[in-house]
Image (tube, grey):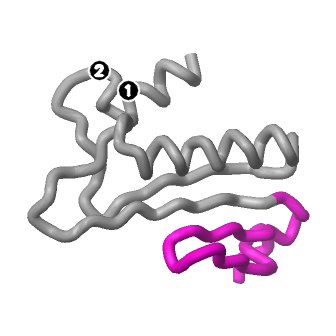
């Protein structure tokens, strides 16, 4: 393992993981899955909103303890337009 890599891995479910890094910080990973052939996830999907909500709770309950939050999908995320359904666009707007 890398010097700054994970020291412990906590699995909430098979698709929700928290890593405790060797520096004592945590990293949260949420993986959203769908059957192939369905459309990509959108920012307005209930499961995506719930994942972002969990990240917000972690940040509120454990300020400064997480170094990164990652949400991924086996089908990717919808990005045809820059609107509230586009997760990347929404996150860019929130960051700015």
Residue indicated by mark 1: 89
Side (left or right) of 93 relative to 7: left
Q: Residue furthest bottom?
A: 1
Q: Tag 2: Cα neighbours inside 10 Å, few (<14), some, or many (≥20)?
A: few
Q: Is residue 64 visible?
A: no
Does the segment drawn in magenta span residue 9? yes
Q: Give the residue displayed 70% in from the left and 59% down from the top.
A: 27
- Closer to the observer: label 1 or label 2? 2
Per the image, label 2 sits on a secondary structure element best described as: loop
Q: Give the residue displayed 30% in from the left and 30% down from the top.
A: 85
Distance Cα–Cα, label 1 vs label 2: 7 Å
Side (left or right) of 62 relative to 56: right
Per the image, label 1 sits on a secondary structure element best described as: helix
Rendering quarter of residue 72: bottom left
Residue indicated by mark 2: 83
Q: Can residue 47 be seen in this view?
A: yes
Identify the magenta region.
Answer: 1-25
Q: Give the residue displayed 36% in from the left and 35% down from the top.
A: 44
Q: Where residue 75 sits in the image (x, y, percent)?
A: 25, 60
Q: Tag 1: Cα neighbours inside 10 Å, few (<14), some, or many (≥20)?
A: some
Q: Give the residue displayed 31% in from the left and 32% down from the top.
A: 86
Q: Where residue 38 sits in the image (x, y, percent)?
A: 14, 59
Asked if labels 2 and 1 touch by Cβ distance under 8 angstroms, the answer is yes
In front here: 29 or 57? Answer: 57
């Amino acid at each position: 393992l890398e010097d700054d890599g994970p020291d412990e891995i906590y699995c909430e479910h098979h698709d929700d993981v928290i890593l405790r890094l060797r520096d004592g910080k945590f990293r949260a990973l949420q993986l959203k899955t769908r059957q192939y052939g369905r459309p990509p996830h959108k920012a307005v999907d209930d499961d995506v909103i719930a994942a972002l909500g969990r990240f917000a709770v972690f940040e509120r309950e454990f300020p400064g303890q997480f170094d990164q939050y990652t949400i991924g999908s086996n089908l990717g995320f919808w990005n045809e337009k820059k609107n509230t359904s586009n997760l990347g666009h929404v996150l860019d707007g929130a960051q700015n």
